[in-house]
Image: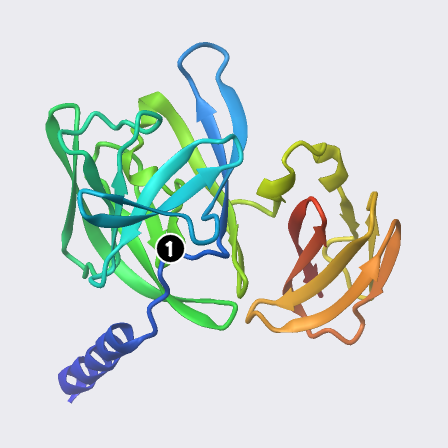
Amino acid sequence: MRKITLFLCLLFFASIIKSQTYYPLVNSTAIWHEQEVHCSGWPCSMFYVNYYFPANLEVTINQKQYRILESYEGDYFFIREDSSKKVFLYQTPNMQFNTDTSEILLYDFNLQPGDTFKINRFNGQLKSIVDSIEMLNIGGQLRKRFYINRLGYGPNLTWIEGIGSSFGLFGNYYIPFEGWHSLLCYNDSLINYISPEYNDCIGYNPLNINEKADNFIIKIYPNPASDYIYIENIKEKARIEIYNMDGMLQQYLNVNGYITIDIRNFPNGLYLIKLQTDIGVVIKKFVKQ
């Protein structure tokens, strides 16, 4: 009887994964905020980069249609996603991974536990394996999270369907001795996601990248809080939105400067504060207890 019950549970879980809504990575409203550390010399250098898809910018290469992905530094990349949930990168001079093909597979979101994912680098083939897959609720959306074992050539990582690697969009191809890359957070028109390793995320609007980042250094306290939270250093008009971890909007207000927010009626738990101005977005976490 136990074996039958276990089998039915596994069958039910597999059916959920198979039938769930798919969220594509190529999304015109998506912005990825990443941290990059380069160690070609000493000391290592660290900087932040954003990637986004400008609306309706496409290019045809070898009879294949690619969307143009840009960074706020002005780099560009050609990305396409097919109906089998595979994401490809066409290599340009600013993104060369020493592979023997012009187009490389970035992600295959149709993989199953036990499947392998292969990349070609340095005249050899590196192989990863999908250890397991779980369903992750982000803003009310159920997305697959893949646990990827890189079998010794680098630290293990995770993929999230429609978001990408925990090591950033191109994380599958980075090798540790070159430095390291981390996804800080991701946001689009429907969800805001902060990597578990970080408590907040600074994102810049790609259309206004010359503004000073000091405008984004805000202070939220106390954290955790039970009755009120206070926000300081808002230097211009901003809209504040507070979401619970199911993606439900709890409160919004327009502010300019110091602000006090009453959270006494909020249920205990973790919340996201999204602060948006004309030049960018800040997302932070706080705990109501």
Which of 147/142 is in front?
142
Image position, residue 236 (x, y; %): 83, 46
Whether residue 217 is visible here, answered yes or no, is no
The relative height of residue 258 versus residue 209 in the rendered view (above or below) is below
Q: Which residue is mark 1?
A: 26
Which of 285/8 is in front?
285
**7 sits to left or right of 45:** left
Which of 232/60 is in front?
60
Q: Quadrant of the C terminus?
A: bottom right
- Residue 244 sits in quarter: bottom right
The colour scheme applied to this rendered structure is rainbow
**38 sits to left or right of 64:** right
Image position, residue 267 (x, y; %): 69, 75
- How crowded pointer 1 is (Cα within 10 Å; few <14, some 14-19, many 20+) is rated as many
- Residue 242 sits in quarter: bottom right
Q: Residue at x 79, y 51 (%)?
A: 221
Image position, residue 212 (x, y; %): 72, 32
**42 sits to left or right of 192:** left
> Given the image, on which type of amino acid does mark 1 rest?
Val
Image position, residue 64 (x, y; %): 21, 49
Whether residue 123 is visible here, answered yes or no, is yes
Q: Residue at x 26, y 38 (%)?
A: 90
Q: Residue at x 49, y 73 (%)?
A: 140
